[in-house]
Amino acid sequence: MKYKENKLKISNSLTGEKEVFESILDGFVGLYVCGPTVYSHVHLGNCRTFISFDVIYRYLLHLGYKVRYVRNITDAGHLENDAEEGEDKIAKKARLEQLEPMEIVQLYTLDFHKVLNQFNNLPPNIEPTATGHIIEQIEMILEIIDNGFAYESNGSVYFDVEKYNESNNYGELSKRKIEDLVSGTRSLEGQEEKKSPLDFALWKDAKPEHIMKWPSPWGLGFPGWHLECSAMSTKYLGEQFDIHGGGMDLKFPHHECEIAQGTAANGQKPVNYWMHANMLTLNGKKMSKSTGNTLLPEELFSGENEVLGRAYHPIVVRFFMMQAHYASVLDFSAEALNASEKGFTRLMEAVKMIKEVKTNESTSFDVDGLIQKFYDAMNDDFNTPILVAHLFDAAKFIQAVQSGKETISAADREKLSEALNAFVFDILGLTEISEDNSDNGSLDTVMELVLQMRQQARENKDWTTADAIRDKLNEANIVVKDEKDGATWKIQ
């Protein structure tokens, strides 16, 4: 098995160190990733997290591990602003749309699956829902109460953070001190039910107007958002498992609370390696609905947006995301996506070309060394940007072989072709883009030339020619927009 030959290192958010990965059971990996709360269309920041962990899942499979990948669907219990009070996000959307909550859940779960399918993500092995595991959540609450780390108050159950902190370290993942957390809390409705403002809900008493509620030993209510993941990960991966992933925004309080719940219920830390994917920015600014600096996947794929000016194929976007490490911030811009699109085309051409190049008796390049660099990059905390750089080295070598500047033996050609297919398609999850579903690469090339000619006319102050080019393109339903970084175009 390849995993025995490769020393995989993972940046563990819990320890802050890059550690050699050792699975609990030899040859088996338990992987849990926090899935979406399905009350709206999945946004690109979420997609980046799921694409990052799809690559991680794919590489673990490539190394020969038998992986159980669990990714949940939150379909109840997630309150507005991730708070302890307020309305359930799904119930609120159902009320606004005058639909049943489960209609909202079904609508946006299907949308979530559709988008990830367009990105060529593999489905998880198990995709449990919060509403399908109410019994398991109630049982876990009872265990936490029995162990002395939770208490009932007016039909709700709260986790006793200060009691837990007497023998454990609440804040160990986010590196926050409990004293600072206490001083940073503010007075909120419902806080009088708690022993401490830090205590978080395991079960909430449902007010009469609350739509989604279930019977429990404490009366009608609904589970706390943090509890859902603890109950489902324990059910399918055990009381202790290998890797837990999610977005950086979930580190506190969601993942911090998961550690506390798992430890309080089972007497041991639930996860060995915590991994967090970082955020996306758009044109250098944080994505935000309030400022309008946001972009949905479908707007990106269709080109119907005011931000980037044109459409990009999902696989090109996926490739673009591979060019930054999962734990670093990644900025979306038309310039970066255009460069990525050209790089993707060059890489695909090389993958095809390797099968056709003529072979020689010997190879003028260290093919084995290059392939080892592919593995070294991924073994170093799944470093996809370094891998992509080495894939381009391979593309450059293949081009040189094609032009007669380098040579390759038949055995090395087969070896390099096999490695490229494994890393490009199986691990990075890229696919070839057919002309039928591409955004027309030929048109891109023509438009690049036309806009260069128009820019030259503008620089020469030949406004008549520049305007004529723009007007003719408008007649062909191609809109040109002049911006400070150059002109962009899109089909109407």
Image (spheres, helix red, strand yellow):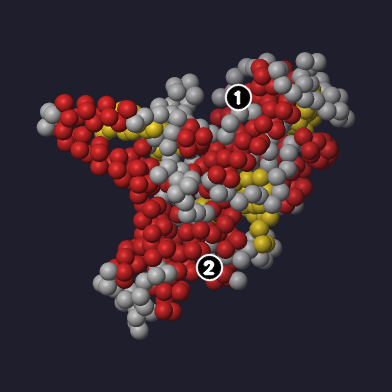
**Circle 1 sits in a helix, a strand or a loop, which is it?**
helix
Task: Specify whether residue 30 is in view.
Answer: yes
Which x, y percent locates residue 485?
A: 27, 33
Mark 1 closeness class: few <14, some 14–19, many ≥20 residues within 10 Å: few
Mark 2 closeness class: few <14, some 14–19, many ≥20 residues within 10 Å: few
Q: Residue at x 54, y 59 (%)?
A: 426
Which x, y percent locates residue 154?
A: 81, 20
Q: Is residue 358 left or right of residue 242?
A: left
The answer to which of 352 and 173 lies nearer the viewer is: 352
Q: Tag 2: residue type?
A: Asn
Q: Is residue 128 left or right of residue 358?
A: right
Q: In the rendered image, which residue does mark 1 sit on? A: 81
Spatial CA distance of label 2 from label 1 is 42 Å
Q: Residue at x 26, y 33 (%)?
A: 486
- Quadrant that contains the C terminus: top left
Q: In the rendered image, which residue does mark 2 sit on? A: 6
